[in-house]
Amino acid sequence: MVVIFIWFIFRFLRPQKKYEWQRNGIFSAFLIALYAEMYGFPLTIYILASLFKIDIPLNRVEGQHLWAFLFGWGERGAIIEMAVGYLVMTIGILLVIVGWKKVYGAKGALATAGIYGYLRHPQYTGIFLITIGMLIHWPTLITLLMWPLMVIVYYNLAKREEKEMVARFGPDYLEYCQKVPRFWPKLSAIKNQIF
């Protein structure tokens, strides 16, 4: 899974500059930490169990999903938790792919149509959603600590890229920034498209 996700990110975000390689390195570290714990020794569950004197039923589905176990949602809750996590991840993956197609299809021009009409950095939003989905599905202490750091890195990267875009496209990009949010689309824009 680590190899597949890292290939996906490097394939669709295509790092070229040093800071882009660093950004993808942070995401890769998040994935390695998540999957090493998920498929290795579930450290988070055992630490929490020992701290709070909890008996974890590892032979049942809800014992294998931290949120379902901690909130007493039962087996059905564990399955719903897993489905929600995968849904959020899938939306994130689609955002990365659609964003990649639009920006590379623009061939150097300013991409403002399609997904770029709703948010300026759909690929980064996609990465946020992928990792949120992973945290819903299988939170670990390491990844819960790493996630805010990763968001800060991507936020700073987005600001850096926006400065480059202002230098490249000038007033057109500044006007675009006034209309389109950075990471999360305006609900009114989505509502107008749906209804």
Image (spheres, helix red, strand yellow):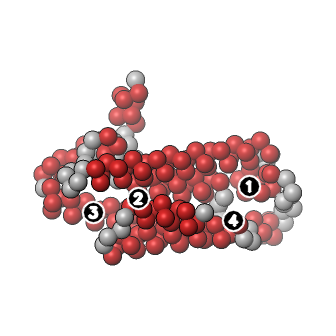
Residue at the disc numbered 4? 38
Residue at the disc numbered 1? 65
Q: Amino acid at mark 3?
A: Glu
Is residue 193 or residue 52 the one in the foreground?
193
Q: Amino acid at mark 2?
A: Phe
Mark 3 or mark 2, earlier in chain: 2
Mark 1 or mark 3, earlier in chain: 1
At a point 80% along the width and 56% down the height, the residue shown is: 63
Mark 2 or mark 1, earlier in chain: 2
Which of label 3 and label 2 is nearer to you? Answer: 2
Residue at the disc numbered 3? 161
Residue at the disc numbered 2? 12
Quadrant for the N terminus, please: bottom right
Vertical placement of 5 versus 102: above or below?
below
In the drawing, does residue 153 fall left or right of residue 30?
left
Vertical placement of 92 versus 25: above or below?
above
How far apart marks 4 and 2 lie (CA) works out to 25 Å
Mark 4 or mark 1, earlier in chain: 4
In the drawing, does residue 27 fall left or right of residue 124?
right
- Which residue ends up furthest to the top in the rendered image? 195
